[in-house]
Amino acid sequence: MNHPTTTTTTLVEPDAFAITADLTQARLPRWAVLLVGVIALGVAGLVTLLTGWSPTGGLVLAVVLMVAGFPLWSMVVEGRRAAADRLATSLVWGAFVVVLVPLVWLIWMVVSHGVSAIDAEFLTYDMRNVVGAGGGIFHALWGTILVTLAATLISVPVGLFTAIYLVEYGRGKRLARVTTFLVDVMTGIPSIVAGLFALALFVLIFGPAIRVGFGGAVALSLLMIPTVVRSAEEMLRLVPGDLREASYALGIPKWRTIVKVVLPTALGGIITGVVLAISRVIGETAPLLVVAGATDSVNFNLFEGRMMTLPVYIFSQYSSPGVVPVGTEGDPPGYARAWGAALVLIVIVMVLNLVARLIGTYFAPKTERRR
Amino acid sequence: MSVTAPPPAPRAARAVVRPGDRIFAGIARAASLTIMLALAGVFVFLAIEGLPGLSAPENIYAPAEDFWSYVGPLVFGTILAAVVALVLAVPFSIGVALFISHYAPPRIAAPVAYVIDLLAAVPSVVFGLWGGLALASSIRPVTDWLYANLDFIPFFAGPPSVTGRSMLTAGIVLAIMVVPIVTALSREVFAQTPRLHEEAAMALGATRWETIRLAVFPYARSGVISAVMLGLGRALGETMAVAMVLSAAPVVTLNLISDTNPATIAQNIASNYKEATPDKQAVLIATGLVLFAVTFAVNFAARWVIARSERKVSR
Amino acid sequence: MAKSIDVSDLSIYYGDFLAVEGVNMTIRAKAVTAFIGPSGCGKSTFLRTLNRMHEVIPGARVEGKVMVSGQSLYDPTIDPVAVRRRIGMVFQRPNPFPTMSIYDNVIAGVKLNSRKMRKSDADALVERSLRGANLWNEVKDRLDRPGMGLSGGQQQRLCIARAIAVEPEVLLMDEPCSALDPISTSAIEDLIHQLKSEYTIVIVTHNMQQAARVSDETGFFNLKAAGQPGHLVEFNPTTKMFTNPDEPSTEAYISGRFG
């Protein structure tokens, strides 16, 4: 980095060029990484062939050889400090490569199995009276949309107004400090506890056998509110105090200043935060499993009867996949449906994330065109 | 330009706080009170429904005898799974975060960061599905090898589970879920290191690794700790990924690769709620309270650690 | 209808910290009054007490009296919002509302006070205010474009147009040219000369030449000593202030010996 990359030492007069001579230092050539990589792969391949290991084992060995070998060579040529640096670099790259493996594997499994499971029937049929193959996610898709929508309708007003209180009214007040603390606590509520809370609440009111979609919405909003508060609070704080002052100086009351000046300025960021919060709770399974229950039929009523949702659908298809038809090979039919639903769910989440990003970039430049 | 004089403000007639302001401020305050009520509600309702679970008829707790010996192994399992996950996840998360913030060429770093952020949004049920259908069956060679070569370590005492649905598998799935979260947070902290500090270290002739150790790590420590704690909280409370991967029994064992594994609290609730009688339901809700207490303690400890190290930095 | 302002024995606090102590002065109607002084002497703080913008900062409070046309601004029955409608303010850095067009920025004060307005009245008000701020000819073809798209000097004149659209009686200006280049500055100074026929103008400036150019009366603020509160040293007609000041410290400051 800081040293010239030349390794050549020329004959110089010691006094005149003493400084130049000090600056040159033994360095591994640029292709050293490649060489070590090739050798590591070669050795690992040979070992794999000779001992009959699996290819995965061979790859692991190659990575280990690479991460250990390169710094060792550097130690010999360049010295201890440079070797430590090389080791850190190798470890960091190694960590990256190793983490990629399961993540790519996961995405690959979902996409490859999911695509083959999805067709028109899959998207438009429910699971009523389906035995064996067939059926679809129609009921779960609607359940997810309704429950998430209801959760959003609960959390956005509460979250947004809380953020407004924290930023505009509560500065230095005890209620604001307590609220900030409680929002922190809420962030840490395990999702299943949120589900149990909604269950306990509805059981107290309606009796022990109650399972309704709205309960799921309550549980999800408990998980969603802290994210909405946090992001909205951050965005409101980014609105320059200048603008508030300009508005006050025109004799505009505080609440109109907030509604007409502060909120529009922060709108893009707030919407982004809300969409991200939705994408986070839309995949929640445990709370819905506990309060909203599972069913095979379409139910459009949030306030009566069990309601299926996509994540719960995946779980129930996985845990009771049905049986493989006699005389055929392969996975039980539920697995294919689970993969298909997983792909649909992931696509929804990704689209929401993308939308959030687009909203963020669409709204952002207007406020920052100048200064 | 003609300027018309507005009528002089009526004296004493108008209150100093305008009604619009009062209503709006009231709504805002009511919203934060709602949060307080909601959280109090979580405690109260869980307590009302859960307290009977502490003293239910003995047969509900079978094979244990009372609530505490019922919940004990569950707490152990919860913590064991989370610790396994963190031990696996933290080094990799920090590595990948450093990769994005300091090592990768910019053209790679930005998309990698984006992909990691997206992965943090993948629902846990999908991780569970992958863990149960793909990872569990593929992990056999690894557990076999661990059993064959390292069975003197209690963690790998075996014999390895035939289905692969062991604590190790659950830990790996949890780790893969936690990695994007911890990475995303630590990356942000690393990237916020003041450029000046790094340049100061480089100007002293430090190598890249020495620069990171001198300038980046001290600055980022509290942020990374809070990221890890957040990951721990997530791992402790995670339900589905564990429920779909682990075959559980009410045991206490450090053995990570056998087919009898301690259950976690969240998983236990999810797998038993369906056939629960009201008595059993109360017991499950009580275990939920215990889980809440554990995660609360973890979060509280995290905040304490952060507050302490922040005070140190500002001093 | 421009108004004069009587300030008597005004002390300004941030919490327990006394920032400005014991100010007495009378600000004449339809004239330009300038405040000069070194940084941190409290001249901007004092300016903000004249339309109760001071109390926007938590913990800030005021002792003493500010009288405008026989009413005490700090009387408990006075609504600060109504005060600010009649005493407008222009800030150091131009701050047009980023989400609004030029047109909407100008009528923001009127519209956000929820006064209903006919379109033709609004159009007339926008044109009148922009002409008043010497900006009409530059922006009349792009009134629907965002206000942030203008240059810094144009933005500042847009802020002045926004302030006079509410038809205030007094216009406070807090270093309105400190973020602008010399050409924009001279445009604003010309504007101040025109505005003084209809408004009482109070301007805070760091630039003594500017004070000499635009103002009729000048007040010099200074700190008694480092760490002490700021106070009004001298308040006199500008010509006297810059030729034959009463106080030696004023002369020292004006002739550049400190500050």
Image: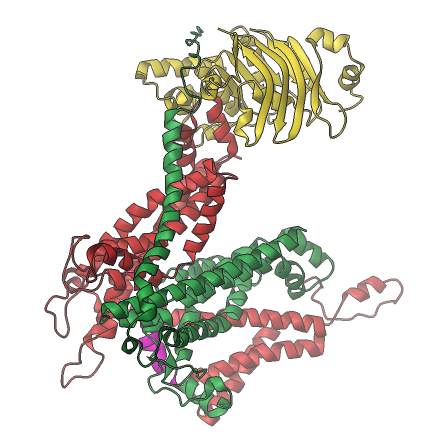
Colour given to chain C in the rendered image? yellow
- Give the color scheme: rainbow, by chain, secondary structure or one colour: by chain
Colour given to chain A in the rendered image? red
Asked if residue B127 is among those painted magenta in the image, a careful observer would answer yes
- Specify the farthest residue to the left: A129
Taking the spot 45% from the left edge, 60% from the top edge, the residue there is: B296
Residue B199 x/y as whole percent: 68, 54
Q: Is residue B234 left or right of residue B201?
A: left
Q: Is residue B274 left or right of residue B84?
A: left
Residue C154 x/y as whole percent: 51, 23
Tell me: residue B265, above or below residue B114. below
Q: Nearer the viewer, residue B229 or B104?
A: B229
The magenta-colored residue range is: B126-140
Chain appearing in green on the rendered image:
B
Residue A161 x/y as whole percent: 38, 40
Work out which quarter of the rendered image holds the N terminus of chain A and state it. bottom right
Asked if residue A183 is among those painted magenta in the image, a careful observer would answer no
